[in-house]
Amino acid sequence: MELYHQEIQKVIDLAHALAADLPPLDALRRWFEEVARYGKLKYGVSEVIHAATNGGLDDKNYEPFLRAITVLLDAGTASGDLKPALDPEDVLLQLSVLWRIPPGDDTTDRATRLLDLILDGLRIRPARA
């Protein structure tokens, strides 16, 4: 379990680094891609961890993971790229689908399509005339 916590901490830390180094939408996309990559590597493990930690709520990395999402969402909102008042727990729930993609030839393509859908839902849209 300690190895899991160390690996998750690296993902959490990456959010802060990306937010500092990239435009908000690029940082968000890159971080989501890393979350997808991690989920692909750990396929099946996430369900065990989820069940063992009261649905994630007892996991010591749950709140830091939410704060990492918040950092990225806040940057995107401040830049005008993302909708205001996005809930990081809602975004985490959307991201959880990435851990459920079964391994296979189309895993990367499917993750890319799902990430596109998630990001499209978070982006602000100009009003139509």
Image: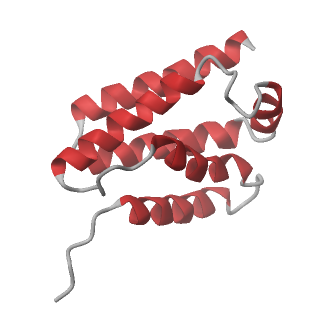
Quarter of the view holding residue 16: top left
Q: Farthest residue in the bottom direction?
A: 129
Q: Residue at x 46, y 63 (%)?
A: 116
Residue 23 image position (x, y, % from top left) = 21, 44
Q: Quadrant of the C terminus?
A: bottom left
For image coordinates 49% across by 22% down, the residue present is: 64
Q: Position of residue 127 (x, y in %)?
A: 20, 78
In this picture the colour scheme is secondary structure
The answer to whether residue 45 is left or right of residue 116 is right
Nearer-the-camera pick, 3 or 118: 118
Q: Residue at x 69, y 30 (%)?
A: 56
> Where is residue 124 shown, x and y percent of the image?
28, 64
> Count of labels shown?
0
In the rendered view, would you say 27 is above or below 16?
A: below
Image side of residue 57 versus residue 88, left or right? right
Work out which quarter of the rendered image holds the N terminus and state it. top right
Q: Please give left or right for residue 46 compared with residue 37 in the image.
A: right
Toward the front, the furthest residue is 85
Identity of the residue drawn at 81% across and 40% down = 44
